[in-house]
Image (spheres, helix red, strand yellow):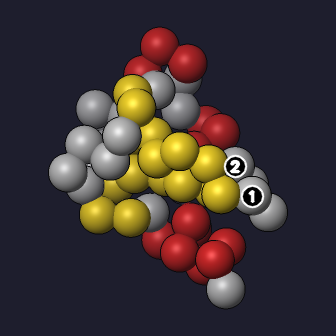
Amino acid sequence: MAKVKPTHSPKSDVYHDNNKCTERNNIETRNIKPGTGGNRKCKHCKDLDK
Ligand SMILES: [Zn+2]
């Protein structure tokens, strides 16, 4: 796993910071925005941190 810069989708209320996160990889390229968007961290990304 690898930590990456936080990204989020405006359609979602979470952000992702792990490149192995399947949810992150499912975000359509045009919907990928940099930063956390003020969102909480994605559950999958949290699990991948362990
Ligand atoms: Zn995630």
Q: Residue furthest right?
A: 1
| Above or below 12: residue 10 | above
Q: Tag 2: Cα neighbours inside 10 Å, few (<14), some, or many (≥20)?
A: some
Which residue is found at the position 28% from the left and 32% from the top? Answer: 10
Residue with the mark numbered 1: 2
Q: Earlier in the sequence, mark 2 or mark 1?
A: 1
Percent of width and height locating residue 33: 39, 27
Percent of width and height locating residue 31: 42, 22
Which residue is found at the position 46% from the left and 26% from the top? Answer: 32
Q: Locate residue 8 relative to residue 25 in the image: left or right.
A: left
Q: Is residue 10 visible?
A: yes
Single out the mark in the foreground, 2 or 1: 1
Percent of width and height locating residue 8: 39, 40
- From the image, which quarter does the C terminus lie in? bottom right
Ligand 1 picture quarter: bottom right
Residue type beneath disc 1: Ala
Q: Regarding mark 2 in the picture, which secondary structure is present there?
A: loop
Q: Are marks 2 and 1 in contact (CB under 8 Å)?
A: yes
- From the image, which quarter does the N terminus lie in? bottom right
Using the image, tell me which numbered label, if any, was put on residue 19.
2
Which residue is found at the position 46% from the left and 47% from the top? Answer: 6
Which residue is found at the position 36% from the left and 40% from the top? Answer: 35
Q: Regarding mark 1 in the picture, which secondary structure is present there?
A: loop
